[in-house]
Amino acid sequence: MMRLTVSRSNTKLGDTPNFNLPAGHSCPGALDCLAKVNKETGKLQQKGKFRCFAASIESLRKNVRTSRNNNFLQLVKLSKDQMVEKITEDVIGDLRRREKLFRIHASGDFFNRNYFQAWIEIARQNQDILFYAYTKSINYWIESLDSIPDNLVLTASRGGRYDHLIDEYKLREAVVVKYSSEAQEMGIPIDSDDSLAYDSKVEKFALLLHGTQAKGSEESKAVFSRRRKKA
């Protein structure tokens, strides 16, 4: 089997190591942000209200597509225990001694129950590392509410197929907004560097929509307007 790949270069995350899967293809709970990229051609198919930033990057960079798809293909057919072993060897084993913060998925999501359970076990076995993840696979989360270790911080990403579970179980959440004024109206902070994502004390925060959006869309106009104000 090929080795799984750990990513580190990211404008938002800096050097924080992260593990990625192909956007859309590994996101069973996605809705508003659903987009998929053909791994061969790089053609992007947007299916949601706005364009997933991770999918846009995949569309532009073949090496990113290859890495994320390889990670997915290596794991998708494995059992939970096999996933734990594979991720521990290839991903956790690749971390530098000083790296104690790890993001699960700057792209992708928990694609099945076994995979979600595998990360719970990996976090449990590595208590010195703080793991965090956004997820729309909330159906898997609520099945394991009592078994998630303190060093695995999850954030429900609103805009998916299981939004009703966010409210029902009062889960911490992140919501995408087009303008900072929307977050101000809701009385919630905006996370620009992931520091709120791994702070378990923060119950709700916003993320500003970014990246390339469909031409002429309200989302595209919002991103352009914010960029123009910064200029």
Image (tube, rainbow, N blue to C red):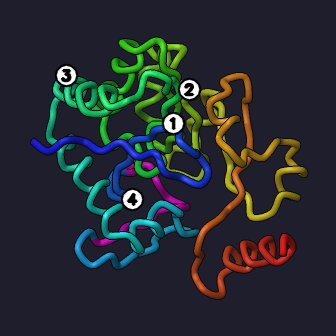
* In this view, the mark in front (4 or 1): 1
User: Disc 4 versus disc 3: distance between alpha carbons?
Assistant: 25 Å
Q: Main secondary structure of the magenta part?
A: loop
Q: What numbered label is drawn on residue 133?
A: 1
Q: Mark 2: which secondary structure?
A: strand
Name the residue type under label 4: Gly
Packing grade of label 4 (10 A; few <14, some 14-19, many >=20) is many
Q: What numbered label is drawn on residue 24?
A: 4
Q: State the residue position of label 3.
A: 81
Q: What numbered label is drawn on residue 153?
A: 2
User: Disc 3 versus disc 1: distance between alpha carbons?
Assistant: 21 Å
Q: Above or below — where is 135 with respect to 178?
A: above
Q: Earlier in the sequence, mark 3 or mark 1?
A: 3
Q: Earlier in the sequence, mark 2 or mark 1?
A: 1
**Across the whole image, how many numbered discs are drawn on residues?**
4
Q: Name the residue nearer the viewer: 162 or 128.
A: 128
User: Disc 2 versus disc 1: distance between alpha carbons?
Assistant: 7 Å
Q: Is residue 68 left or right of residue 162?
A: left
Name the residue type under label 1: Ala
Whether pointer 4 and pointer 3 mark residues with C-beta atoms closer than 8 Å, the reply is no
User: Disc 4 versus disc 2: distance between alpha carbons?
Assistant: 22 Å
Q: Above or below — where is 28 with respect to 110?
A: below
Q: Residue furthest bottom?
A: 216
Q: Name the residue nearer the viewer: 162 or 217.
A: 217
Q: What numbered label is drawn on residue 106?
A: none
